[in-house]
Image (cartoon, coloured by chain):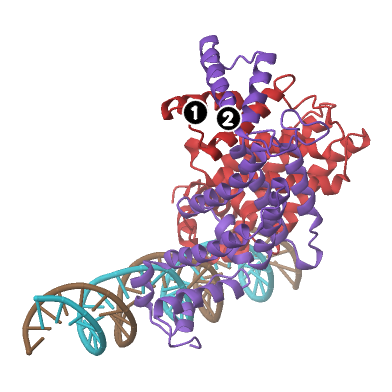
Chain colours: A red, B purple, C cyan, D brown
Amino acid sequence: MSLDDQLPPKTRLLRAAAELLANSEGAAVSTRQITKLAGVTAPTLYHHFGDKEGLFDAVVAAGFEEYVAGERDFAPSGEPLEDVRRMWDNHVQFGLTQPHLYLVMFGNIRPESRPSIVADAEALMEEMLNKAAAAGQLNVPPREAARSILAANVGVTLMLIAEPVEDRNLELSTMTRDSMIFAVSTDKARGAAGDDSGKSSVVVAAIALNAALQASHSDQLSSSELKLFLEWLHRISGSS
Amino acid sequence: MSLDDQLPPKTRLLRAAAELLANSEGAAVSTRQITKLAGVTAPTLYHHFGDKEGLFDAVVAAGFEEYVAGERDFAPSGEPLEDVRRMWDNHVQFGLTQPHLYLVMFGNIRPESRPSIVADAEALMEEMLNKAAAAGQLNVPPREAARSILAANVGVTLMLIAEPVEDRNLELSTMTRDSMIFAVSTDKARGAAGDDSGKSSVVVAAIALNAALQASHSDQLSSSELKLFLEWLHRISGSS
DNA sequence: CTAGCACCTATAGCGTTGCTATATGAACTG
DNA sequence: CAGTTCATATAGCAACGCTATAGGTGCTAG
């Protein structure tokens, strides 16, 4: 209806589908909307893409190109695990900026198209982890580490997408990310990720006390005192 | 069409929907299939559940009851982190035995119903982690740890569901599980504060925090705040 | 130049979907 | 027994994914 009439119908259909898929807030997108926006009639869609899912697959494929491009466009920083962190962050960012596309790619269960895409993403991650493994930084085989990290990455991204935008907390992502990398790496010295040098015992103790207080209903403090006390406790035990 | 005619239509609708949802391999389930199987006509469905999604929500709610029941039916083994492992495994098992129900619960993006269910699951996990925190076994606040672990748990489960049954490898689950628990727990080489391995109480935690605070001069609190904080801490740790 | 031939697109419509305006029966309440 | 409420059925709408069929376009062959 309002798309560049110069372009071939196939391209117009792709763009219309991508646009509607990105803008419809979770609602279903109909072929009629798509063909109308593309300025084409129904059979054209089915001639080029077979069926609705075929069109969506094509959109996803294009989106995946974008995703892979983003994942590859990192200067290999010489520190493979740092690159893994950036891959993770890029993954999350992709999911948050294109939630619907992401959901079609990773959130659905489509016995055909999904595994291939996931496998590609795994391969990308594994490639990077291979360098880490070569440098003796890996605790487990790269393939298993890649699958594990990617699974956590997808879980975190889905959880963030499902949350209302206003209380999305990226800390969930960084924390899970570093947890996973920490667990699969041999470098348990806690060099890059952790901010806890000497404060860690304070943090641990504060967390423990916080939990204990909430569990045992101590009556040593008045309720207003307790409220303030817990607030401070949270400040101490919180990351920042 | 073949369901117990003694039961009230509402129950028959629920069972029919659950059965069709569980048996249809990812394909969409129509209201006509459901009402036909339940031996009811369309308006009955809409009278009781409002719309199709309302019916599905009811099915999900019932499924969630089952899930929670499974998560609660563990003897608290005295080792909280071990219980977290069992919660994780139970979560994965639930997802693998009821994949479609699981997908509706955790794989979808439904800004209304989903977060509440996820929040419940988080609360369940947090509850268990609170015990670990009270025992000084936690590196991070229980809420954040719960969200992080649950996110990874969901990601792993979705990935396993999406895989062909024949090459599902549960090692992905156990490895990711242990990675996450390992990363958030203090129990690596040396415990920081709660290493007295007995059940830590409010008093013990308060004492530990007190000592740790004085030793490390955290700058999260102003000096006057710190003074009052320490006084309360003293009151807690002194009077029992 | 024209005939044939792929290729691409449109007209029109089929069967199914989620859902509802309306009516009917049953069960309780006064 | 009249009135009201709850629960179910009849019939049908608008929107959906999709397609049988036919018409137009540009190519190459003779």
Where is residue C8 drawn, in percent x and y?
Answer: 59, 61
The residue lying toward the viewer, choosing from B140 and A25, is B140
Which residue extends farthest front? B240
Q: From the viewer's perspective, is A113 left or right of A19?
A: right
> Callout 2, which amino acid?
Ser
Q: Residue at x 42, y 64 (%)?
A: B54
Residue closer to the observer: A116 or A89: A89
Determine whether A74 is above or below A6 in the image.
Answer: above
Of residues B36 and A121, the one nearer the viewer is B36
Amino acid of disc 1: Gln
Which numbered disc, 1 or 2, marks the residue closer to the eye? 2
Q: How many marks?
A: 2
Examine the rendering and report whether any part of residue A93 can be seen. Answer: no
The reply to whether the C-beta atoms of the residues labelled 1 and 2 are less than 8 Å apart is: yes
Q: On residue A220, which mark appears?
A: 1
Q: Tag 1's secondary structure?
A: loop
The chain holding disc 1 is A
Indicate the chain on which mark 2 is placed: B
Question: What residue is pinned by disc 2?
Answer: B240
Q: Look at the picture and state if D19 lies above or below A176.
A: below
Residue B219 in sight:
yes
- Measure the alpha-carbon separation of dots 1 and 2: 9 Å
The quadrant in which residue A201 appears is top right
